[in-house]
Amino acid sequence: MFIFLCYMLLLSLPKLVLSVLQLGFLSKEAKKEPYILEQEKFLQAARYAILREKISVLNTLLDLAFVGFWLLYGFRALENALNFSPLVESVVFVLCFLVAQFLVALPLGAYQTLVIDREFGFARGGVKLFIMDTLKSFSLLLIFGGILIFAFSWIILSVANWEIYAFVLGAVLIISLNVLYPTIIAPLFNKFSPLENMELKEAINALLVRVGFKSEGVFVMDASKRDGRLNAYFAGLGRAKRVILFDTLLDKISSESLLAVLGHELGHFKHNDIYKMIALILMFFATLMFFVANMPEALFASVNLESSPQASLVFLLILSAPFGFYFMLVVNFLSCQNEFNADKFGASLTSNEALANALIVLVKENNSFPLAHPLYMRFYYSHPPLMARLIALGCERLGKNGIA
């Protein structure tokens, strides 16, 4: 009961308070004179943000009920039902928890994608693609989740000071995911093709050479098959780096603005932002690992469990949510600073107006409401609000008057 109350007071209740603040803020701002967006788009973006936040409230309540069930009844009942060797039991125990978590979150995820996103013109893939994506995600959970649980459980059972070795394994995993994501994981869900527009490709390559960015190339992702949003990013580490353009982006902004967006992404590369974020994640993981490894027996006993690999791992999973919630205050603050610096770098490669125009198009096409409650932004926004970015670029007039 103690852990459940802590989870509710430290995570669920603050998230609900933030959602209430955000919903009230959105409803109030939607009645004011719009800026950046035209009246109809402004109201549509506000309505979309309100619906998404209401889904977030339901997710928070569902998560609280789910965690409460497992802490108060589920873990003990499952442990009594299993009768395997310690290693196998640990894998089955933790996988059962993860699979249940996946399935419980599925209905609201389906409603968000297939109903709300479709209503606002984003979801394009339909039920079949959603099912395929879900099956792929579930398969990855079973295969890689099972392997990782086995590895962590073996470490906990076999070595003293297991948290040190588990941290090393986690660090290797995090770095490996960043290396493998663009070439192994992302292609499971999307098709990536070399950029065919030779004029644009030459301009991009010239920009990459100018910055000193060596990669596997520039690729176009078929994002439009499931979503209408615009984006561009670069992913990977070392020689596995790739520049990724959403196919939706190529049709919506000018070549100059596209180069400005890429310049922004290259700013993250130039400032080593990916490595900084990996370092932050590793710090968070180390802190969480140390806490779980040194948990008093009384906390395990409070949910009728003995100290064991499976108990340590499920506590690691459960506690990562409240720990991560407050850790994001630091991550988001630093991320926003990184975004301002990347904006400055991207604008220096093209022009302030080109990047400002691109940012405005992204907000308009992605149906993003340009405002949020200040406290809500600190917890959930990794990017500064659009007007703050336009002011930093010296282009606030564009936010009021539209694209130049």
Image: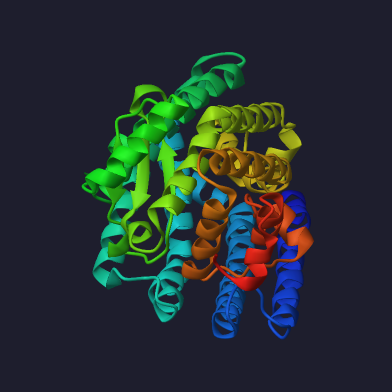
Determine the residue positioned at 56% across, 42% down: 314
Identify which residue, 107 or 99, lies in the foreground: 107
Q: Which residue occupies 38% across, 74% down?
A: 114
- Toward which corner of the image does residue 121 lie, by quadrant? bottom left
Placement of 168 over or under 267, stated as above or below: above
Q: Is residue 283 above or below residue 354?
A: above
**Left or right: residue 129 compared with residue 296:** left
Residue 191 appearing in the image: yes
- Residue 385 at x, y = what percent? 67, 58
Q: Where residue 252 appears, x then y in whole percent? A: 38, 64
List x then y, in percent, for residue 284.
Answer: 65, 33
How many numbered discs sit on the rendered protein? 0
Q: Nearer the viewer, residue 268 or 60?
A: 268
Residue drawn where x is 46% and y is 35% of the image: 90
Task: Give the quarter of the figure containing the C terminus.
Answer: bottom right
| Quadrant in the rendering for residue 88 | top left
Left or right of 297? Residue 353 is: left
In the rendered view of the protein, which quadrant contains the N terminus? Answer: bottom right
Q: Nearer the viewer, residue 152 or 200?
A: 200
Q: Is residue 22 left or right of residue 90?
A: right
User: Taking the image as drawn, is residue 82 in sight?
Assistant: no
Name the foreground residue: 217 vs 235: 217
Q: Residue furthest top?
A: 160
Residue 97 position, x and y percent, is 48, 50
Colouring used for the render: rainbow
